[in-house]
């Protein structure tokens, strides 16, 4: 079975401070991992992904995420938060070994609301 | 610019009505998805389709059906709407195949359905 856990419903951080949004996953094989962001009253947008190779991946808007296989984690980070980063963030996973009709399916976490205050 | 368009941003329907939610993508994607989003529950997959006329149940298919007669269009149907189907509905599409690109979903703006 594939699943994702986002242990924090909310993360609050001051502008200019580093931020971390946590994600852990469970797959039977090797994972593809993704982060998506949802701004208020909008659909989700792809932010970044881990496929293979370097454990630190960089994405849009200055975000990055670190894949840690031993801890089965894929935490989202940003060195200096902006008020405009305030949004709902979703982590998602897909097993690389997925085949057949389930090939394209992602499993999402419940989301973490990030609030950056001025 | 790539685009996933959902036909209605806001709908208000009465219990028992039949509801159609339409989604069109212009990226020639093989995969299309319907999710519902509820506070505290995240995204839950209702149905997805990996090819024309093909469909797979997601986690919460009860009370819903789907139709994919053309590659670019994926419709969600509520045969008899109920109040517990009041929610935000999100359509998404992605490339097919085994690679990581298949996980890059493109979402529509969402359709907020209220059932009275």
Image (spheres, coloured by chain):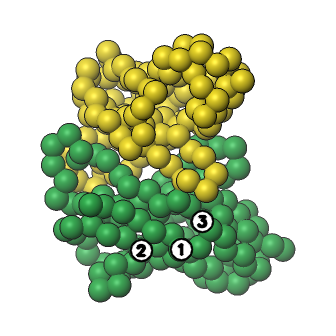
Chain colours: A green, B yellow
Task: Label 2, secondary structure: give it.
Answer: strand
Give the image location of residue A96, x and y in percent: 21, 60
- Determine which of the numbered discs, if any, sits on residue A7 in the image: 1
Q: Residue at x 24, y 45 (%)?
A: A102
Q: How far is the residue under mark 1 from the one under mark 2?
A: 8 Å
Of residue B27 and residue B94, the one placed in the foreground of this image is: B94
Tag 1–tag 2 contact (CB < 8 Å):
yes
Q: How far is the residue under mark 3 from the one under mark 2?
A: 13 Å
Residue B64 to residue A109: above or below = above
Task: Label 3, secondary structure: give it.
Answer: strand
Q: Which residue is mark 2?
A: A24
Q: Is residue A113 visible?
A: yes
Going from N to C along the chain, the mark reached first, 1 or 2, is 1
Q: Residue at x 81, y 73 (%)?
A: A117
Q: Residues within 10 Å of mark 2 (few under 14, many from 20)?
A: many
Discs 1 and 3 share one subunit: yes
Q: Residue at x 44, y 56 (%)?
A: A108
Give the image location of residue A60, x and y in percent: 53, 62
Tag 1–tag 3 contact (CB < 8 Å):
no
Q: Which residue is mark 3?
A: A112
Give the image location of residue A54, x and y in percent: 31, 78
Q: Is residue A19 left or right of residue A107?
A: right
Q: Residues within 10 Å of mark 3 (few under 14, many from 20)?
A: many
Task: Label 1, secondary structure: give it.
Answer: loop
Residue A49 to residue B1: above or below = below
Question: Which quarter of the picture shows residue B106?
Answer: top left
Q: Chain of mark 2?
A: A
Going from N to C along the chain, the mark reached first, 3 or 2, is 2
């Amino acid at each position: 079975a594939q699943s994702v856990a986002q242990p924090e419903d909310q993360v609050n951080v001051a502008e200019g401070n580093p931020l971390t949004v946590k994600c852990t996953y469970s797959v039977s094989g090797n994972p593809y991992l993704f982060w998506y962001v949802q701004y208020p009253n909008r659909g989700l947008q792809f932010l970044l992904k881990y496929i293979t190779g370097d454990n630190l991946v960089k994405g849009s808007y200055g975000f990055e995420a670190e894949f840690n296989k031993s801890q089965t984690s894929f935490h989202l980070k940003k060195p200096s938060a902006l008020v405009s980063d305030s949004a709902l963030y979703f982590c998602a996973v897909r097993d690389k070994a997925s085949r057949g009709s389930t090939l394209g399916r992602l499993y999402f976490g419940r989301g973490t609301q990030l609030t950056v205050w001025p | 610019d790539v685009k996933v368009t959902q036909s209605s941003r806001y709908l208000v329907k009465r219990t028992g009505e039949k509801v159609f939610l339409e989604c069109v993508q212009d990226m020639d994607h093989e995969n299309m998805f319907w999710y519902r989003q509820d506070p505290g529950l995240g995204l839950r997959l209702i149905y997805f389709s990996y090819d024309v006329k093909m469909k797979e149940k997601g986690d919460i298919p009860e009370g819903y059906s789907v139709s994919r007669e053309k590659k670019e269009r994926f419709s969600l149907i509520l045969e008899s709407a109920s109040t517990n189907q009041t929610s935000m509905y999100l359509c998404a599409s992605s490339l097919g195949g085994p690679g990581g690109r298949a996980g890059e979903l493109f979402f529509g703006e969402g359709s907020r359905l209220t059932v009275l």
